Image (tube, rainbow, N blue to C red):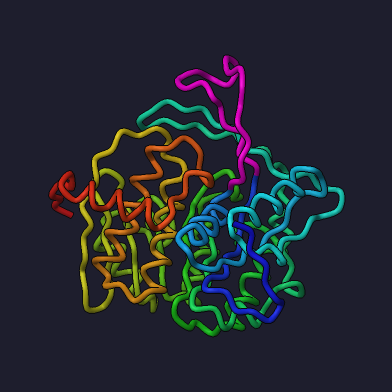
Amino acid sequence: MTVTSRIGDVPDVVVIGRICIDIYPEQIGVGLAEVRTFSKSIGGSATNVAVAIAQLGNTARLITRTGDDPFGDFARTELARLGVVTEAITSVPGMQSVLTFCEIYPPDDFPLYIYRNPTAPDMYVEAERLPLQQIASAPIFWATATGLSREPSRSAHHQAWGTRGRRPHTVLDLDYRPMFWDGEQHAHDAVSEALDHVTVTVGNLEECRVAVGETDADRAADALLDRGVELVIVKKGPDGVLARTRDERIVSAPIPVTVANGLGAGDAFGGALCHGLLHGLSLQETLDLANAAGALVATRRECSLAMPTLADLTEFVTGAAAARTPTHI
């Protein structure tokens, strides 16, 4: 499915952030030194979210930058094939695209080796190149905290938020990865500043701790709501997911699955969360759909290529309903 668009078209979701090429092993349960063959697919958290949104039948425009190399050409071609609008993806002269290798030790050990030092092309997204009309008008604008770790990307994010004016749904994926920051305080300060501009946050307990200093799900949600966030999503891994607004407290119980690779689950969650928000689902329906998307993708080896269609996800949700377990979040 290849998507083309006119420059003035407003997509359902505008996504800004990280892109890479995933080089994943075809042998499971061994270290990279023992891997014989690899598969190649598009990756990066924001990129995977854009693919997940598109695979569910919505329009997604991705803002990022690649290296000036054949991997960058592959990224644009592959994203277009997967349904993502690619006009805002440009290359950085003289830079190489980011490569990400992993090891796969199911069910819960997936070491990553990300070749993006000392920096990456997606950190060179520039404010003057942003499609500001689409950012301001899209029903959802999705950004990740990683984009705040370096300039000029950080300034571009603030330009985007300034243009958008904290309208619904302005989403920040708290996305804390220590390797991208100068230290935890650097990440905390950048995320804390960003919270004044967003209406939805998504993160796990560790990411909530870095953002607001709380590791209890409800206390973290309270702290984020106090900052003006309207919808807080706290992911607790095997203990399920909590969603909080000022008026609602919703829990989605865990779905037991046999995990093949957990690396793409959070991005699938994000894509389905956007789908629910776009289509007016209740908060419970939206959270359950997102939780199911994450569980489904965890059963598959790749990330972007694992993102389900709406038909796939609907079938999985139906089958998983009986397997859902109670939780005491």
Residue 223 appears in which quarter of the rendering? bottom left
Give the residue displayed 52% in from the left and 73% down from the top.
12
Of the pair 155 and 21, the residue shown nearer to us: 21
Residue that protrudes farthest toward the top in the picture:
34
The span shown in magenta is: 21-43
Residue 77 falls left or right of residue 113 = right
Q: Residue at x 60, y 64 (%)?
A: 16
Q: Name the side, left or right, on which 292 lies relative to 25.
A: left
**Residue 172 rendering spot, x and y as whole percentages:** 48, 66
Give whichever of 63, 219 is nearer the camera.
Answer: 63
Q: Is residue 197 left or right of residue 257?
A: right
Q: Position of residue 86 (x, y in %)?
A: 68, 62
Q: Position of residue 251 (x, y in %)?
A: 21, 60
> Is 63 in the magenta?
no
- State the residue at coordinates (86%, 53%): 93
Q: Quadrant of the C terminus?
A: bottom left
Q: Quadrant of the N terminus?
A: bottom right
Measured from the top left, where is residue 240 in percent x and y?
A: 25, 51
